[in-house]
Amino acid sequence: MHFDILQRPFQLSQSQIDFYRKNAFIKIKEVLTPEVVAHFNRVISAKVDKLNTQTKKLKDRDTYGKAFLQIFNLWTQDVQIKELMFSKRLAQLAADLMEVDGVRMYHDQALFKEGGGGITPWHADQYYWPLSTDRVITVWIPLQAVPSEMGPLEFAAGSQEILTGRDLSISDESENLIGEKLRVTDCPKISEPFDVGEVSFHSGWIFHRAGPNTTNQTRKVMTSIYMDKDMLLKKPENDGQINDWETWCPGVEIGKVIDSHLNPILFER
Ligand SMILES: O=C(O)CCC(=O)C(=O)O
């Protein structure tokens, strides 16, 4: 199935761009239609079912494992998912918010928080990424509405300026230490439900988390990470970054533009 809306630009207001620059996240309603969301819910759910290798019961997993099922780079597995992840609408939104001339794919991932699933601890994504600047952004696309009880993404607005906690992987420790730090800062914590068609964008260094899913329905979310088309590979600083280099930027040399076959340019002015 083909959806014209995915190629149509979404016009941001200057105040939305200013909001993102200040807060490092934004929620935007009506980026996608209910038809598009329902279609990709079916397509992505089927792919996640097929590719999921998690067999442990929730109660037997660690905190990270309880947070979500995580399946990577679905765009390489399915042409329809590729159409969504490569859509000009999302890629241009990413470029407009980051105020860059173009964006490339870093990678995508489905994040399915199962019914009864646990919290996603406080963290900053860029801990995991061997990227030379902060011009990197994640679009978080709910595949159904996300009421508070399902664990919508929560942001500490403006926390991209805080350095404490950037060196922590997603864990009980990150939840506690970053949570403590945020209690003594004046970054407002924004945790709001998502409507169908609403998406959020957040930057690499903002601290974010999600509450547990206390319903018996899976909170299905698809995400894609876009980076500045001129992003350089930095020398990795931890094992996660070495893994990301090998997995999402294969063959790219340190100090060079990240332009492997997995990192096509998706929008350019
Ligand atoms: O979906 C979640 O619970 C967490 C998502 C997240 O941390 C991200 O997309 O960066």
Image (cartoon, rainbow, N blue to C red):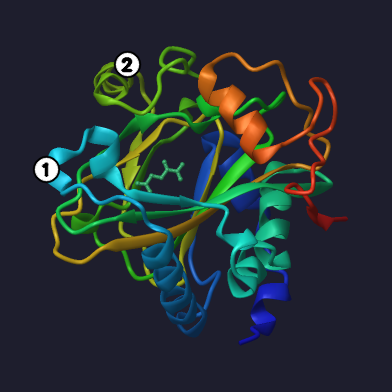
Query: Between 96 and 225, which is closer to the camera in this rendering?
Result: 225
Query: Between 104 and 10, which is closer to the camera in this rendering?
Result: 104
Q: Is residue 98 left or right of residue 192?
A: right
Q: Is residue 148 left or right of residue 3?
A: left
- Sort mark 1 into few (<14), some (14-19) or many (20+) by Cα contacts within 10 Å: few
Residue located at (42% from left, 78% from top): 42
As drawn, 231 above or below 92: above
Residue 76: tell me if it is visible: yes
> Separation of disc 2 and disc 1 at Cα?
29 Å
Residue located at (62% from left, 37% from top): 247
Please give the residue where the numbered disc 2 appears in the rendered image: 181
Give percent across and percent down for residue 136.
Answer: 65, 38
Q: Is residue 55 left or right of residue 157?
A: left
- The kind of secondary structure element at disc 2 is helix
Give percent across and percent down for residue 134.
Answer: 65, 29
Give percent across and percent down for residue 245.
Answer: 66, 30
Quarter of the picture holding the C terminus:
bottom right
Give percent across and percent down for residue 165.
Answer: 41, 16
Residue located at (73% from left, 50% from top): 95
Residue located at (72% from left, 20% from top): 234
As drawn, 40 above or below 164: below
Q: Quadrant of residue 236?
A: top right
As drawn, 49 above or below 127: below
Residue 225: tell me if it is visible: no
Please give the residue where the numbered disc 1 appears in the rendered image: 59
Q: Earlier in the sequence, mark 2 or mark 1?
A: 1
The label number, if any, that marks residue 243 in the structure image: none
- Amino acid type at image mark 1: Lys
